[in-house]
Image: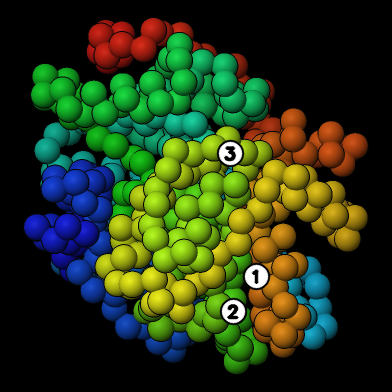
């Protein structure tokens, strides 16, 4: 299979699409076609990583990774991704739990898959170099997930750029506790300074020649594809058991997770409705309402990993739907304020004694707002994107109780934090490579 840029100027193999991240014409890589699949093709597969390997096979056809795909999936997707039933009866509700990876957020899925593919591309000699340096600028969960995924992987070094002291203590810890091949640099400044520095580094020929810089950001198609696999697996399993479709509510920021679900449905999976829940960054709901795509600067909210005012993956969705009426057929979108996020966390805890993270709370609110006619006799699944323990400083005061961290996160919190603080200049980064 070939991958083409959303701006259509060229087609490359999946190895190039993964190693280069974005296309040289500034567009985003997408598969040249979304192959039609039938659930019977997955009859032999039981575990998530087996379903994922079958699901992803057409995308990897004729690449050096094709024979390795089963191994890549069992290496990268080695944690549970369960759908748990929360409410039964004629308005059944379940949760897709994407937070059982090493850093307790769904970004582990894409980051681990990307790492497993990148190291194999390097080993195969199909990359430009036998060793690469990945630079990530991070405000949300990406830095931690990428650091965890590449930690101690051969041939790869990761530089994590984070704004000095502007994140929660636990988030800061998760990005800085690695050591070995992970270099954490706290940049004096804001997230925008980190992002500018990363861009400057990628544009610097000398640095690129010396260190073979790569990006691992969320628009890499190697992160999106495995995300579509959990929508496929969840809907296949439910259809096998009941003959029914599954509808999803997806907490949404840059639209990667949402696009992955749209792709799975387009490829023939038994998926019903798709609802995107956003925070106070309303670019997507405003577009459905007004019919005009108006990107803007992001505003800070409690669901910080969704603070995106110009969702990049819209460019990919626009290839599938050329006008807003088609988009309205594809999905709906609900915006959720910080006040409502707080109220929802408290309310859902009262209902089920489960603490949800602020991102997941947007999904619960969007679900509760659906008219009963849409909920009745329809299998709805809210996508839980992170564990509440990652956002303890927000969630614990609301509930007046402490939230136990999952085992892997608890272990990370015992590792010593190690990072250097630098001023916001490219020379400072260069001198540490
Ligand atoms: C990144 C992230 C999101 C948003 O996902 P997109 O793919 O950017 O839409 C939601 N929740 C959490 C916890 C995240 O880390």
Image position of 202 with respect to 233: above or below: above
Give the alpha-carbon distance from disc 2 to disc 1, as whole Å: 7 Å
Q: How is the image coloured?
A: rainbow
Does residue 418 appear anywhere in the picture? yes
Could you tell me residue 328's position as x and y percent? 46, 74
Q: Which SS class for mark 3?
A: helix
Q: Is mark 1 within 8 Å of ligand 1?
A: no
Mark in front: 1 vs 3: 3
What is the number of the mark on residue 381? 1
Q: Is mark 2 within 8 Å of ligand 1?
A: no
Image position of 281 (left or right of 198): right
Give the position of the C terminus as an image quadrant: top left
Quickly name the residue at label 2: 246
Image position of 227 with respect to 51: above or below: above
Q: Residue at x 36, y 28 (%)?
A: 195
Local packing at callout 2 (Cα closer than 10 Å; few below 14, some 14-19, many 20+) is many
């Amino acid at each position: 299979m070939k991958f083409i840029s959303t701006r259509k100027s060229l087609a490359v193999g999946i190895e190039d699409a993964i190693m280069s991240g974005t296309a040289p014409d500034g567009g985003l890589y997408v598969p040249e076609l979304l192959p039609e699949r039938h659930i019977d093709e997955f009859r032999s597969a039981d575990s998530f990583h087996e379903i994922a390997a079958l699901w992803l096979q057409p995308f990897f056809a004729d690449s050096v990774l094709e024979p390795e795909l089963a191994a890549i999936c069992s290496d990268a997707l080695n944690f549970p991704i369960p759908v748990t039933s929360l409410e039964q009866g004629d308005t059944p509700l379940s949760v897709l739990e994407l937070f059982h990876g090493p850093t307790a957020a769904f970004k582990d899925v894409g980051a681990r898959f990307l790492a497993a593919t990148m190291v194999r591309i390097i080993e195969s000699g199909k990359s430009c170099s036998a060793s690469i340096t990945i630079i990530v600028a991070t405000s949300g969960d990406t830095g931690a997930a990428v650091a965890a995924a590449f930690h101690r992987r051969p041939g790869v070094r990761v530089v994590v750029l984070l704004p000095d002291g502007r994140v929660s203590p636990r988030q800061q810890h998760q990005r800085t506790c690695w050591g070995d091949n992970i270099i954490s640099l706290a940049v004096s400044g804001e997230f925008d300074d980190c992002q500018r520095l990363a861009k400057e580094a990628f544009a610097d020929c000398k640095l690129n020649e010396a260190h073979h810089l790569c990006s691992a950001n969320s628009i890499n198609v190697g992160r999106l594809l495995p995300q579509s696999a959990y929508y496929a697996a969840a809907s296949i399993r439910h259809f096998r058991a009941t003959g029914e479709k599954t509808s999803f509510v997806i907490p949404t920021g840059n639209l990667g997770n949402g696009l992955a679900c749209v792709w799975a449905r387009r490829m023939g999976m038994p998926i019903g409705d798709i609802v995107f829940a956003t925070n106070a960054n309303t670019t997507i709901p405003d577009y459905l309402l007004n019919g005009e795509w108006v990107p803007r600067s992001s505003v800070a909210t409690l669901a910080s990993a969704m603070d995106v005012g110009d969702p990049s993956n819209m460019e990919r969705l626009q290839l599938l739907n050329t006008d807003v009426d088609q988009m309205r057929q594809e999905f709906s979108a609900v915006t959720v304020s910080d006040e409502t996020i707080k109220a929802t966390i408290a309310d859902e805890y009262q209902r089920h004694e489960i603490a949800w993270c602020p991102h997941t709370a947007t999904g619960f609110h969007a679900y509760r707002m659906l008219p009963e006619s849409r909920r009745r006799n329809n299998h709805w699944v809210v996508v839980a994107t992170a564990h509440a323990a990652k956002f303890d400083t927000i969630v614990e005061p609301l509930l007046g109780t402490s939230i136990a961290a999952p085992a892997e996160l608890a272990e990370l919190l015992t590792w010593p934090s190690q990072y250097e603080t630098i001023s916001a200049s490219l020379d400072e980064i260069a001198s540490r490579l």
